């Protein structure tokens, strides 16, 4: 029997919202009709008919003829308001907003249960890479040892420019901004937060654990210096910003985001520029690797389009891993061997690492190595960031 087309209310008409309109038009997909588009700022020139536009969310949320909401706005509080109101009104929702999802995961899971509607978010984690669906459907019951990868295109672009173009951090960041890969305020990308939000979404599907952002330590690349690049290059290695969810024992997970050294045999070694990659280590099928564009209007639009097709087919996430592994706990005693570069004004004794080893002085900085637990790293994260210490995981 032919299903009726989805009637869609779209929130946001920026990079992602416009990308969706473009791929909908380009693909000729007949089963999705955009009824209304809600935006924020009056007076902007927009490439859509005026009668489609509104500035009032209720024009979509209270319209019973609209059965599907696509949320592509750039704020997380407003987005949570829109998404939860839409779900309570019985509308299915597709969203690209990882910050909103990661910050409200438990609530949104409960809301899906209570309302019976479907909430899909393939585009929110690694853009065009079909990783949520892969974890949900293909690995829905197979245990995974590890999920890791490169989830943030901006920081990966900066790292690639520093390695291949010999640029310093500020110049590489400016190039990323000029190329449209970094926001004017790049903090969330370069400090590891964006990668952490995506890791939280994927951990729910890969290992069944629902986490909130404050449970996951994150470190970024803001304080990376050319000396750190040289340290990696001299050893034939590269530095990547690595989100990791690792099973450390039965029902125990280590979950963190930290720059790390990567060797030539690692698939992530050659994931460069704005590309993303996801590495899975699974118990029955072994290693799997997915690589693709993590951002941009059309790649993200492609993931949204795929979610719409899934909705049309009556799809909902089953959260099978969460049902099976609901009692999983965090292993905050998991140990990492780390490298830290600190400005020389910081006395060695003030550096919050037990038994620093291999201390080397280098200009106006020094480097130490140490073995630390995740719990210790998490507690010291803010101090290290404020004191401009660059931290990365050794191989
Ligand atoms: N950019 C990417 O490649 C990418 C990839 C994956 C996921 N995402 C996620 O997708 C979302 C959108 O990103 P983007 O890059 O498309 O942002 P963007 O280009 O800045 O566009 C944001 C849009 O949201 C609208 N908006 C903001 N607040 C609103 C509100 N309260 N009500 C209605 N409309 C509102 C803005 O309206 P005005 O036009 O009136 O200002 C604008 O059209 C974010 O959550 C982002 O994290 C982005």
Image (cartoon, rainbow, N blue to C red):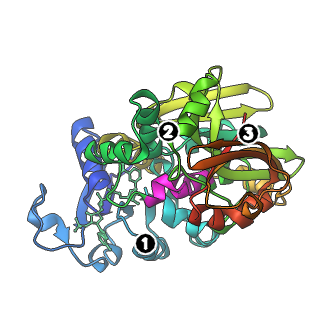
Q: Which residue is mark 3?
A: 146
* Foreground tag (1 vs 2): 2
Real-space Cα distance between discs 3 and 1?
35 Å
User: Which residues are the magenta region?
Assistant: 187-199
Quadrant assignment, res 184: bottom left
Q: Quadrant of the C terminus?
A: top right
The rendered magenta stretch, by its main secondary structure, is classed as: helix
Left or right? Give the position of 20 relative to 237.
left
Q: Quadrant of ligand 1?
A: bottom left
Which residue is denoted by mark 1 in the rendering? Answer: 86
The residue beneath circle 2 is 226
Within-10-Å neighbours for mark 2: few <14, some 14–19, many 20+: some
Q: Is residue 44 above or below residue 220?
A: below
- Label count reads 3
Q: Is residue 245 left or right of residue 238?
A: right
Point out the tag, 3 or 1, that comes first from the N-terminus. Answer: 1
Is 106 above or below relative to 47?
below
Looking at the rendered structure, the secondary structure element under dot 2 is helix
Establish if 323 lies above or below 22. below
The secondary structure type at the circle numbered 3 is: strand
Single out the mark in the foreground, 3 or 2: 2
Beta carbon of the mark 2 residue lies under 8 A of ligand 1: no
């Amino acid at each position: 029997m032919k299903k009726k087309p989805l009637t869609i209310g779209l929130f946001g008409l920026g990079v992602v919202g416009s990308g969706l309109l473009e791929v909908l038009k380009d693909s000729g997909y007949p089963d999705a009709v955009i009824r209304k588009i809600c935006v924020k700022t009056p007076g902007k020139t927009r490439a859509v008919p005026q009668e489609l536009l509104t500035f009032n969310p209720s024009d979509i949320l209270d319209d019973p003829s609209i059965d599907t909401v696509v949320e592509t706005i750039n704020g997380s509080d407003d987005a949570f308001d829109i998404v939860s109101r839409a779900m309570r009104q019985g509308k299915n929702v597709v969203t690209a907003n990882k910050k909103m999802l990661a910050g409200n995961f438990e609530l949104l899971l409960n809301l899906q249960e209570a309302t019976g509607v479907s909430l899909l978010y393939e585009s929110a984690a690694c853009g065009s890479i079909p990783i949520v669906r892969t974890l949900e459907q293909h690995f829905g019951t197979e245990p995974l040892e590890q999920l890791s990868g490169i989830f943030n295109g901006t920081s990966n672009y900066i790292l690639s420019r520093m390695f291949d173009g010999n640029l310093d951090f500020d110049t590489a960041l400016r190039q990323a901004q000029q190329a449209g890969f970094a926001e004017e305020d790049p903090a969330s990308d370069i400090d590891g937060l964006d990668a952490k939000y995506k890791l939280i979404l994927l951990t729910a599907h890969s290992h069944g654990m629902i986490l909130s952002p404050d449970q996951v330590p994150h470190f970024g690349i803001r304080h990376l210096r050319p000396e750190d690049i040289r340290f990696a290059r001299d050893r034939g290695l590269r530095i990547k910003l690595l989100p990791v969810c690792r099973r450390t024992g039965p029902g125990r997970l280590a979950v963190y985001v930290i720059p790390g050294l990567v060797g030539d045999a690692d698939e992530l070694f050659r994931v460069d520029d704005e590309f993303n990659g996801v590495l899975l280590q699974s118990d029955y099928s072994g290693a799997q690797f997915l690589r693709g564009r993590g951002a941009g209007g059309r790649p993200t639009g492609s993931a949204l389009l795929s979610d719409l097709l899934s909705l049309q087919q009556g799809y909902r996430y089953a959260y099978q891993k969460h049902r099976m592994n609901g009692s999983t706990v965090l292993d905050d005693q998991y140990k990492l061997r780390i490298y830290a570069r600190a400005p020389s004004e910081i006395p060695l004794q003030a550096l919050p690492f037990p038994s620093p080893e291999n201390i080397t002085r280098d200009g106006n900085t020094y480097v130490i190595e140490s073995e630390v637990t995740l719990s210790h790293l998490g507690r010291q994260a803010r101090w290290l960031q404020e004191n401009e210490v660059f931290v990365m995981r050794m191989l």
